Image (cartoon, rainbow, N blue to C red):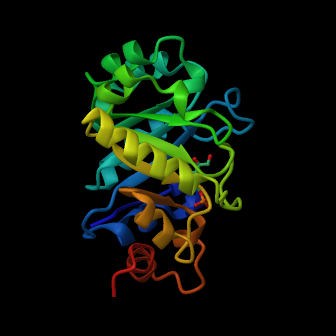
């Protein structure tokens, strides 16, 4: 089943405990946390203290997406959170293989992400064999509620082919502007994990399970 990772960026922050409770019990569901440092992207979200509170209130795997200039610093500070995924940006590191190896010590899976304008060729074969996940941004990172960039579909297909050629095992995750109208084309292209913020938390009915099923294309 396609994993869905609701991005808390779009949730009701003043009622975050209730929001998390509404997601409990769903299978193949992660919680996507967007950590922004006001430097790598022009927006600032939350860090360790808030993540610690979230970790204490949810039994779902935490999928942390670090949009930060210095991911290595965050590896050190996030040790106790038992993260399921630690994803950093390729544009933010000098030595991505070294960062990935370091992050592996504090998270179950390590992911690498790229901005829409960054060439897939910036991910070396060595890195692709090392990571557990590649996060394809389908909007410019920094804000929720943006429009999906359809060029991402070809990038997913290319990554899927590359994974087969390398006999690599990384999951392909896509993030930004995803809703039930475009999710099927992403799954068909090869996406294993879909991040969705607005589509889930800002849906008219606020029926999260229903939106999650729609995103997966299951009845
Ligand atoms: C953007 C974030 C996304 C964003 C997704 O920088 O990485 O996770 O919150 O939100 P929607 O689904 O609203 O585009
Ligand atoms: Zn994200």
Q: Residue furthest right?
A: 42
- Observer-nearest of 209 and 136: 136
Residue 182 lies, with reference to residue 91, above or below; the image says below
Tell me the quarter of the picture where residue 109 sits.
top left
Name the quadrant of the N terminus. Answer: bottom left
- Residue 187 point in image, percent of width and height: 41, 65
How many numbered markers are drawn? Answer: 0
Indicate left or right for 201 with 131 as reference: right
Tell me the quarter of the picture where residue 117 sits.
top right
Name the quadrant of the C terminus. Answer: bottom left
Residue 194 lies, with reference to residue 219, above or below; the image says above
Q: Residue at x 58, y 52 (%)?
A: 152
- Observer-nearest of 74 and 40: 40
Indicate left or right for 186 with 190 as reference: right
- Observer-nearest of 172 and 188: 188
Q: Residue furthest front?
A: 165
- Residue 94 point in image, percent of width and height: 54, 11
The answer to whether any part of residue 132 appears in the image is no
Q: Residue at x 63, y 33 (%)?
A: 118
Q: Residue at x 46, y 78 (%)?
A: 211
- Residue 20 point in image, percent of width and height: 39, 63
The answer to whether any part of residue 6 appears in the image is yes
- Residue 97 point in image, percent of width and height: 39, 17
Q: Residue at x 34, y 23 (%)?
A: 103
Residue 72 lies, with reference to residue 46, above or below; the image says above
Residue 215 lies, with reference to residue 150, above or below; the image says below
């Amino acid at each position: 089943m396609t994993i869905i990772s609701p991005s808390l960026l779009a949730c009701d922050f003043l009622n975050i405990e209730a929001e998390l409770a509404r997601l409990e019990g769903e299978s193949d569901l992660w919680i996507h946390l967007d950590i922004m440092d006001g430097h790598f992207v022009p927006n600032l979200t939350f860090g360790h203290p808030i993540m610690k509170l979230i970790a204490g209130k949810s039994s779902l795997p935490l999928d942390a997406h670090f949009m930060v200039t210095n991911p290595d610093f965050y590896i050190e500070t996030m040790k106790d959170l038992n993260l399921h995924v630690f994803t950093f940006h390729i544009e933010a590191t000098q030595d991505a293989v070294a960062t990935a190896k370091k992050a592996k010590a504090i998270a179950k899976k390590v992911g690498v992400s790229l901005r829409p304008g960054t060439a897939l060729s910036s991910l070396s074969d060595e890195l692709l064999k090392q990571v557990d996940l590649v996060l394809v941004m389908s909007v410019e990172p920094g804000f929720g509620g943006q429009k999906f960039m359809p060029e991402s579909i070809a990038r997913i297909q290319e990554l899927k082919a590359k994974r087969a050629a390398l006999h690599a095992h990384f999951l392909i995750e896509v993030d930004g502007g995803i809703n039930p109208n475009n999710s099927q084309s992403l799954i068909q292209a090869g996406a294993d994990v879909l991040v969705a913020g607005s589509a889930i938390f800002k849906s008219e009915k606020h029926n999260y399970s229903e939106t999650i099923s729609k995103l997966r294309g299951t009845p």
